[in-house]
Amino acid sequence: MKALTELVLASHNAGKLKELQAMLGDAVRVRSVAEFSTVEPEETGLSFVENAILKARHAARISGLPALADDSGLAVDALGGAPGIYSARYAGGLGDAANNAKLLEALRDVPDAERGAQFVCALALVRHADDPLPILCEGLWHGRILFEARGAGGFGYDPLFWVPECDCASAELPAAEKNRLSHRARAMVQLKQRLGLA
Ligand SMILES: O=P(O)(O)OP(=O)(O)OP(=O)(O)OC[C@H]1O[C@@H](n2cnc3c(O)ncnc32)[C@H](O)[C@@H]1O
Ligand SMILES: [Mg+2]
């Protein structure tokens, strides 16, 4: 495969973009999909990987560049894996604070021992819009859902995600530490290996 020198990041989420950029480092020139369009594709897939591919193809189509997309979310054991692929839209598209409030309410009577959850990240890289062989990598991060928000770092559900290996919430971790441990970091390690960037 031709060495990858430039790619477009197919995400409109500022928190994700910051993390993905930090993880990619200087190895490739990163462009934002917002340079090309503010229209977000509909996430109609039934899995993280399908949505990641769909977002990557859309970005490659409008930019003419290779594209990397991240579809991620939180799968809560006591909720049968919800909100899962619907994590961004869990409270009807009202944003992170509303999503977190809804999650706390849904788990109000669930004891600590049953509050297991995992963050999931699927990365898809397509070399062009119709690439028949996208590079696909996945990462999981296991933790528990807290009873109240803690910390001000990260984004999304980070204030409610307890990280056992650090004894703190994900939103209390320094950015570099989250970028070493997270679901996104785990998927990115694999992607960099596949691209020969590791
Ligand atoms: O689709 P793009 O444009 O990338 O942005 P998005 O925010 O809509 O992204 P997703 O469709 O992948 O939805 C992922 C949601 O899951 C949550 N999420 C994913 N990764 C997370 C992380 O590292 N920390 C906290 N919440 C996270 C967060 O609420 C995101 O909005
Ligand atoms: Mg999305």
Image: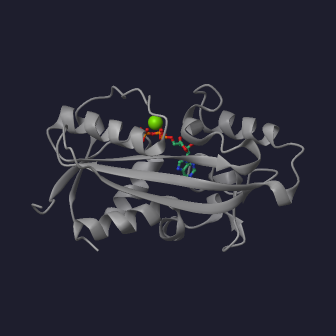
Measured along the vertical axis of the image, is residue 98 above or below residue 27?
above
Where residue 165 sits in the image (x, y, percent)?
66, 74
Count of numbered labels shown in the rendering? 0
Question: Within the image, what quadrant is residue 24 found in?
Answer: bottom left
Q: Is residue 25 something one can see in this rendering?
A: no
Image point (84%, 60%), residue name:
113
> Outermost residue toward the left?
2
Relative to 139, is 82 on the left or the right? Answer: right
Measured along the vertical axis of the image, is residue 187 above or below residue 92?
below
> Outermost residue toward the front?
132
Along the line of sight, which residue is nearer the eye, 184 or 132?
A: 132
Question: Within the image, what quadrant is residue 96 found in?
Answer: top right
Image point (51%, 64%), residue name:
175
Image point (64%, 62%), residue name:
142
Image point (81%, 37%), residue name:
105
Q: Is residue 85 something one can see in this rendering?
A: yes
Measured along the vertical axis of the image, is residue 35 above or below residue 117?
above
Quarter containing the C terminus: bottom left
Measured along the vertical axis of the image, is residue 190 above or below residue 41?
below
Relative to 157, is 4 on the left or the right? Answer: left
Colour scheme in use: one colour
Where residue 172 sits in the image (x, y, percent)?
65, 63
Along the line of sight, which residue is nearer the eye, 28 or 107?
A: 107
Where residue 3 sits in the image (x, y, percent)?
12, 63
Where residue 180 sits in the image (x, y, percent)?
48, 71
Along the line of sight, which residue is nearer the eye, 132 or 101?
A: 132
